[in-house]
Amino acid sequence: ADHEWGYTGENGPATWIEKFPEARGTRQSPVDIDTSRASSGGSAPPLTWRYSVNHTRSVVNPGYCWRVDENGYDSELSGGPLGSDVYKLQQWHCHWGAVNGEGSEHTVDGRAFSGELHLVHWNTSKYHSFAEAAGQTDGLAVLGVLLMVGTKHEELEKVVRLLPFIQHKGDKVTMSEPLDPAMLLPQRKAYWTYPGSLTTPPCTESVTWILFKEPIQVSAEQLALMRKLRCGEASCGVEAMELLHNYRPTLPLGNRELRDYGG
Ligand code: 1SD
Ligand code: ZN
């Protein structure tokens, strides 16, 4: 329906500020990572994740991406820029472009990648629920993984092969084979980090962004299957539009500190 936000000319990022005032803020995401502006993070404790592999996950089409819900298991992220707090994995999802070579939300020295995975975590040391954490300045931590076109990603394929079953908004399937979210991360741990926001409405300024420097490879076919998802429901009469792209353009970093860890 045209009253909802999305990525078309009528409901796209440029229009979000009308209904979501936080989208005008000074701590918005994504940003271009100007690598010459990054200051060395120094000797923070290493970023550490402990993800659970064997449990049932649901894969959903909310109308603006595909998303895998972790269904309450205690996969955790800590260390690095997160101080002494522990963050729990809530869900992960993807952003992509209409053509290869665009689709990432963050860019690096002006360069876009073909997509970006987001692993969304919330601060369980300080807050009681995801919803509560999502409104706090230190509530969320999102790991960003840049996607480039190359060889097929076998772990991601466990999700991609379910996409034909969630073509429409509101569709949901269960993934019963084991999947290791850690296998979605690049080999090298080096990353950039800065304080930012959700990249979708309501664009709340609650995210510590951690963007890995090294991209992972996915195949052109895997990206093509993502572009076939539709942003509307099946029962509209007219077939809903394809979700050809779902990335927000970059916003100014302003005077926020961008830090560089490793590599
Ligand atoms: O786009 C996601 C959105 O789907 C939702 O998951 C939100 C968290 O509630 O996070 C944003 S994002 O900032 O991780 N892109
Ligand atoms: Zn995202």
Image (cartoon, grey):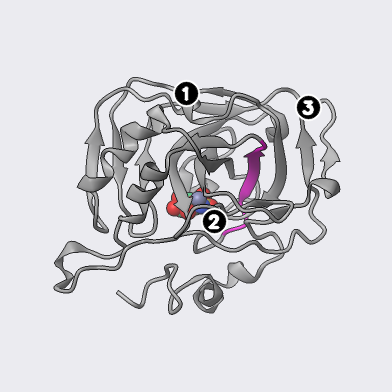
Mark 3 or mark 1, which has the lower sequence index?
A: 3
Q: Position of residue 256 (x, y in %)?
A: 79, 54
Kindly identify which numbered label has been placed on residue 51.
1
Report whether 194 appears left or right of 232: right
Report whether 119 appears left or right of 252: left
Kindly identify which numbered label has been placed on residue 85.
none
Q: Nearer the viewer, mark 2 or mark 1?
A: 2
Distance, label 3 to label 2, CA atoms, is: 32 Å
Q: Name the amino acid type tagged 2.
A: Glu
Label 2 Cα crowd, 10 Å radius (few <14 / some 14-19 / many 20+): many
Q: Position of residue 132 (x, y in %)?
A: 50, 49
- Region of the chain picked out in magenta, as a range: 204-213
Residue 81 in the image: above or below residue 166: above
The residue drawn where x is 60% and y is 67% is 22
Q: Name the amino acid type tagged 3.
A: Ala
Magenta-drawn stretch contains 162 = no
Q: Which residue is mark 3?
A: 44
Distance, label 3 to label 1, CA atoms, is: 21 Å
From this viewpoint, is residue 87 visible? Answer: yes
Q: Secondary structure at mark 2?
A: loop
- Mark 3 CB near ligand 1 (8 Å cut): no
